[in-house]
Amino acid sequence: MALAGAVVALFFLAPYLVMLIGSFKRHSEILRIPATYLPTEWVPSNYASMWSTPETPLAYNLVSTIVISACGTLLVLVVAMPAAYYTAKHRFPGRLAFLLLVLVTQMLQPTVLAAGLFRQFLAIGIDDTWLAMILVNGAFNLSFAVWIMHSFFAGVPKEIDEAAMIDGASTLQTLRRVTLPVVWPGIVTAIIFTFVACWNEFAASLVILTTAENQPLTVAITKFVGQYDSAWQYVFGVSIVGIVPVIILFAMVEKRLVAGLTAGAVK
Amino acid sequence: MTTNHRMEVPAPAISARRQARRDLVAALPWLSPALTLIVTIVLFPAGYLLWTSTRDVSPVGVDRGSAGFDNYATLFDSPALGRVLLNTAIWVVGVVLVTLLVSMALAQFLDKAFPGRRLVRLAVIVPWAASVVMTATVFYYGLDPYYGVMNQFLVDVGILDTGFGFTRQPVPAFLVAMAVAVFVSLPFTTYTILAGLQMVPREVVEAAAVDGAGSVRTYWSVVLPVLRPAIAVAVLINIINVFNSLPILRTLTGSIPGYDADTTTTLIFKYIQQDRQIETASALSVVNFVIVLAVIGIYLRVVRPMRDE
């Protein structure tokens, strides 16, 4: 079993090992025929020189990715949490229509709407800005966050809420002391999913962000791949820098992920 | 008496309606942030897209008036469209189906206890954590016929005599892209099914074993019915994601001239970026969305994922 496990792990890690090893090769070696599995000479200085290349202003790209992902996630949280809470706890006319509308946004992805979004942002003058991308990431990750959090809020038994109320707790106190601890795994799942989706977003950024300084890492790495010459060592160095933080994030919540998916999407 | 009666009957109706309106007004502060975002960033651009698809737009973006259905005519007259639609069907059905089958086996494996399981599960997550562009790019590099390290590996283990140009011709490049699409779809799908497996009652599985049911029989009649909602959700999300996937094909087949390795989604971006035809792109986007809706509609109708509710 453990051996089969190792084979499975290797299968999923192999491309990323190629990336990691490639990021330490000299430019001349990574284009050598035949290819070498391990660098004949390890060049860690690639990780220093990749920040100042003619292809793309990488430091700006990293800041772009961080700002867009952080703000996009925050926007999703601020917008989705009240909606998820209220639709789970209250019955009102239009509730189902609202939830269906949220579902439809899941189908309308940025790739389908790219042309429309591009024209709209151009018309109101926020094309090629972080703001535009924060709004896009916020809007298109909303539905999954609402879904997940909705099912967690709905999972809090009414009796617990009522008991807290009878004991004299205010609505806000009940929310903080009773509801929040129960729905916390759901919120964490929503945050992780949203953050990863924002961090790796590509299609909308490609169309909406036209200035090199504004573009995120996902768009930036494509600049290193040319028709005649490609700086693969930088492509892979940047990829490693982009992937490692997300893996650490996932490693921290791996156990909760299954629980979050069980309660949120599957039940 | 009659007047009294007449006045009494509509009263509850009015108050019920008033109550409904009051409920709706009470709900609005909680929903309006989400509604605002959906209306301005999803619905408005969708409408704008529909509008643009009937306009005559210059390559630099100037609206030159109505075009009626000319953009749609241009689109349907395009000789590439047939092949692109066929590609799209193969792409979605192939990727989603293979992803599902592999994920089911993988989830079953990862559900069992074995030393180092946590690390293996973490390894399976990695393609999910990685940006799809980055994953696709490493395959594009590795499969280069001359300096690609994956090609070299295939030669060294004796599968190939010399490096093969996987990404140089439409058909092999398209197949490689499908394999990469499966690869990056596996983590989410596997985890969703793994989550579903937590709902399978252990006692029932054990009882089935005691009753002499084989593992295939147990899986088919005990595990699979419990997995149904998890599979339904995973497949639905995969259909949407795979259909809208841009980076894999753009990276692996983008340098091949022509449209033989395009799906409708990548064709939209070629119209926007290469050909500067935002109006044709808009028309195709509208067609694309109608196709997604139809596919999901058929899926919901045939599979009925919500049947048990």
Image (cartoon, helix red, strand yellow):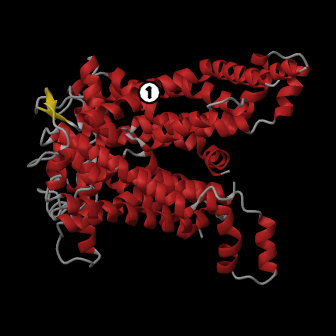
Q: Residues within 10 Å of mark 1 (few under 14, many from 20)?
A: some
Decide if residue A237 is on the left or right side of residue A190. left
Decide if residue B202 is on the left or right side of residue A41. right
- The quadrant where residue A4 appears: bottom right
x, y percentage for residue A105?
46, 38
Residue in front for this viewpoint, A67 or B222: B222
x, y percentage for residue B290?
36, 49
User: What residue would you read off at disc 1?
Assistant: B39
For this orientation, the residue located farthest to the front is: B2
x, y percentage for residue A229?
11, 47
x, y percentage for residue A110?
36, 38
Question: Element under label 1?
Answer: helix
Decide if residue B230 is on the left or right side of residue B95. right
In the displayed structure, A233 sits above or below B170; it is: above
Residue in front for this viewpoint, A26 or B213: B213
For this orientation, the residue located farthest to the left is: A228
In the displayed structure, B7 sits above or below B218; it is: above
